[in-house]
């Protein structure tokens, strides 16, 4: 079951350049920066009232974020829902006809399990399911 919007993922070419912009223009403070090898990204998190902004910088040219920036430029990349059971959420979406990018959950930022659903399945929105921190 989906419990909340966990975060919005934003593709950026450089965290070193993007983080100060988010801090200076919005008055937000970067909570932490973490590398996620499974997704070939470095991430920076901002807490906005319990929903997070996740800036994503590619760490290699074959990173999904590098491909996204090459195709569409920087900007909103994905919407992440927290769920009490990522695997069950995937099964539910799949049986409802969704095309999955991850058939099973993988390790994401913050020690959470994550899995992605193809944007074609949700009207152009790349969707992530991640484990609710209360349940991980
Ligand atoms: Zn994410």
Image (cartoon, rainbow, N blue to C red):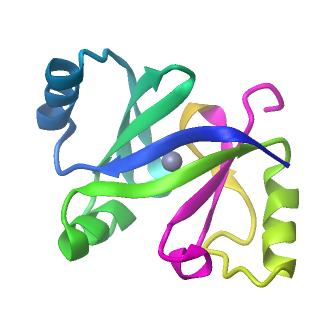
- The residue lying at 46 percent from left, 45 percent from top is 8
Residue 95 image-quadrant placement: bottom right
Compared with 116, 14 (above or below) is above
**Residue 32's image quarter?**
top left
- The residue at the point 19 percent across, 72 percent down is 70
Q: Position of residue 50 (x, y in %)?
A: 57, 22
Q: Is residue 63 left or right of residue 111?
A: left
| Number of marks present in the image shown | 0
Front residue of 53 and 34: 53
Q: Quadrant of residue 131?
A: top right
- Residue 25 lies, in percent from the top left, at 15, 24
Q: Nearer the viewer, residue 62 or 52?
A: 52
Vertical relation: 136 (above or below) 89? above
In the rendered structure, the answer to whether residue 125 lies left or right of residue 76 reads right
For the C terminus, give its image quadrant: top right
What residue is drawn where x is 79% and y is 65%?
90
The image position of residue 36, as x and y in percent, is 46, 44
- Give the magenta range: 111-136
């Amino acid at each position: 079951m989906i419990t909340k919007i966990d975060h919005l993922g934003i593709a950026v070419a450089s965290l070193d350049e993007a983080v100060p912009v988010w801090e200076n223009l919005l008055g937000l403070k970067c909570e932490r920066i973490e590398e996620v090898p499974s997704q070939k990204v470095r991430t920076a998190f901002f807490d906005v009232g319990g929903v997070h902004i996740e800036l994503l910088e590619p760490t290699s040219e074959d990173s999904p974020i590098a491909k996204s920036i090459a195709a569409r430029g920087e900007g909103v990349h994905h919407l992440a829902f927290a769920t009490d059971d990522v695997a069950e959420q995937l099964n539910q979406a799949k049986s409802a006809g969704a095309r999955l990018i991850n058939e099973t959950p993988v390790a994401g930022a913050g020690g959470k399990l994550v899995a992605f659903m193809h944007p074609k399945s949700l009207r152009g929105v790349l969707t992530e399911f991640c484990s609710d921190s209360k349940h991980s």
